Image (cartoon, rainbow, N blue to C red):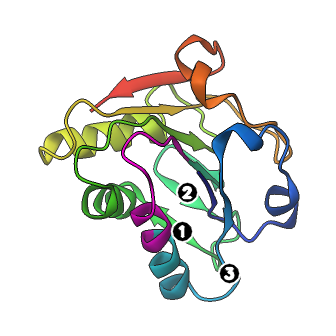
């Protein structure tokens, strides 16, 4: 499942490589609270082994929109949504499809927040540690562990 967590029209229109992920979900444009409720609902629909991709603009600490007046979710926000809404026994991979600039990127920081809270130990979270074009193709969810563009961090 892909959840597009930005109002950027380029990212919202890009479905290159999306088919193997299954459902392609766009959060409805509007306010942050409604988008968060929608994101929680989509995460709650995941199958126990279904991969999840959160697609947005981002940096090492936040994902969402580039515009500060737009959407933005912190590490703690996303960790809390995942912990409370993923199905019991969830063992799918999670990809954060967003820009980052450090090896200690959003996905690595997210795994650390979840580990520090004792949440979902063993879960793998993948992400980029370089800039990512808005129209970048989604990687195959079955090949995340061998994709040299991604780094994985285990919770």
Q: Are marks 2 and 1 in contact (CB under 8 Å)?
A: yes
Which numbered mark, 2 or 3, is in the foreground of this view?
Answer: 3
Whole-angstrom CA distance, mark 2 to mark 1, is: 6 Å
Q: Please state which of residues 121 and 113 is positioned toward the viewer in this rendering.
A: 121
Mark 2 or mark 1, earlier in chain: 2
Image quadrant in which you'd find residue 155? top left
Does 35 sit left or right of 112 as displayed? right
Whole-angstrom CA distance, mark 2 to mark 3, is: 16 Å
The residue depicted at 50 percent of the width and 43 percent of the height is 60
Crowding near the residue tagged with mark 2, few <14, some 14–19, many ≥20 C-alpha atoms within 10 Å? many
Image quadrant in which you'd find residue 37? bottom left
Q: Estimate the x, y position of residue 121 in percent, counting from the top left.
A: 19, 35
Name the residue beneath numbered marker 2.
63
Name the residue beneath numbered marker 1.
72
The circle on residue 54 is none
Q: Which residues are magenta?
A: 40-52
Q: Please state which of residues 81 and 93 is positioned toward the viewer in this rendering.
A: 93
Image quadrant in which you'd find residue 112? top left
The residue depicted at 63 percent of the width and 72 percent of the height is 68
Name the residue beneath numbered marker 3.
28
Does 108 sit left or right of 53 as displayed? left
Q: Secondary structure at mark 1?
A: strand
């Amino acid at each position: 499942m892909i959840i597009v967590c930005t109002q950027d029209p380029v990212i919202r229109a890009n479905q290159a490589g999306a088919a193997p992920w299954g459902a392609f979900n766009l959060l409805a444009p509007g306010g942050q609270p409604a988008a968060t409720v929608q994101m929680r609902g989509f995460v709650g629909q995941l199958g126990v082994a279904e991969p999840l991709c959160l697609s947005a603009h981002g940096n090492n600490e936040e994902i969402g929109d580039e515009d500060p007046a737009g959407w933005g979710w912190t590490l703690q926000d996303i960790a809390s949504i995942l912990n409370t809404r993923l199905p019991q026994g969830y063992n799918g991979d999670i990809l954060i499809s967003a820009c980052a600039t450090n090896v200690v990127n959003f996905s690595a920081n997210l795994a650390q927040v979840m580990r520090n809270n004792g949440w979902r130990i063993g879960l793998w979270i993948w992400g980029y540690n370089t800039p990512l074009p808005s129209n970048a193709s989604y990687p195959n969810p079955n090949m995340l562990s061998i994709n040299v563009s991604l780094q994985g961090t285990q919770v």
